[in-house]
Image: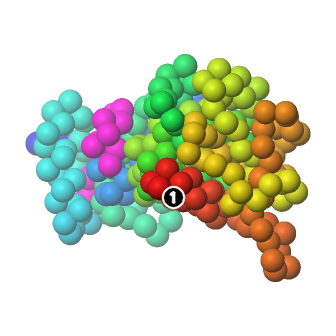
Amino acid sequence: MPERITSVQNPRIKAAAKLRQRRAREQQGRTIIDGVREIERALAKEFPLLELFLCDELLVGAEADALRQRVASQPNLQVYDIPRDVCEKLSFGERSEGAVSVANYPVTSLDACQLSSTPLIVVLEDVEKPGNLGAILRTADAVGADCLIAADARTDLFNPNAIRASLGTIFAVPTFEATTAETMAFLRKHGVQMFAARVEGAVSYEQVRFDGPTALILGSEAEGLSDRWLADDVTNIRLPMRGIADSLNVSTTAAVLLYEADRQRQT
């Protein structure tokens, strides 16, 4: 039987609630996962969960039943039974699905990255908005990208809001972090073609081939890519903009490029 916790002042609850803050996540080396689908997907991919807090009153529906079945097969996972008010203390905003988990941060070093023979890689430089990171991970998962590399990231990769925005696909797409210099060296070492998305890119994305080893490189919405990507072995590409706007949201740009790469690889 799960241990019962009834007070929001319980030390485990207080420690988990602190993980909403980046400083606490960095200090503890942990993050918090909020949501039935997200936790079920984390378990399915053997993500390093430590604690799971469940509120039976809120756990309803087929996805909740699937989560219960998954939890039953995890004898080493520490599960706690909590009431609604404690669950709401842990949950984000108005969303309270009755399941919140604490997990260790995984290894995100590029040394752990394994590529296929013709990898499709997403590189995000200076990413700062967890929502964009999560949205891009959803598309990367949809097209079967090998991995995502956050270069000089301004947000922690497993920010709870990134996890939520990804709908748990962050657990399915190998995700790494490195400096821009380390990322470029890694791509060159593995013979990966580099395509940098820029408003002023010399070549339209429709004119290049993404069916070989490919890295699609995107920058922050505020500043775009740094000049470090202005290298002879980097092709600067653009999306045609025929209206008054000069660029798209970075997650939209990523979706266009990833699906074009997927289309080319399927033909």
- Residue at (44, 48) in percent of width and height: 144
Magenta region, residue range = 41-57
Q: Amino acid at mark 1?
A: Arg
- Residue 168 among those drawn in magenta: no
- Residue 48 among those drawn in magenta: yes
- Residue at (26, 66) in percent of width and height: 58
- Residue at (85, 42) in percent of width and height: 226
Quadrant of the rendered structure where residue 27 is? Answer: top right
- Residue at (36, 32) in percent of width and height: 48
The reply, left or right, for residue 136 in relation to residue 49 is right
Q: Residue furthest left?
A: 1
Identify the colour scheme used. Answer: rainbow
Q: Can you give x and y, in whole percent of width and height, for residue 9 in the image?
A: 41, 46
Residue 34 is at least partly visible in this image: no
Q: Can you give x and y, in whole percent of width and height, for residue 154 in the image?
A: 71, 42
Nearer the observer, 250 or 236: 236
Instruction: Give the residue pinned by disc 1.
Output: 263
> Tag 1: Cα neighbours inside 10 Å, few (<14), some, or many (≥20)?
few
Q: Can you give x and y, in whole percent of width and height, for residue 108 in the image?
A: 53, 29
Q: Can you give x and y, in whole percent of width and height, for residue 46 in the image?
A: 30, 35
Quadrant of the rendered structure where residue 260 is? Answer: bottom right
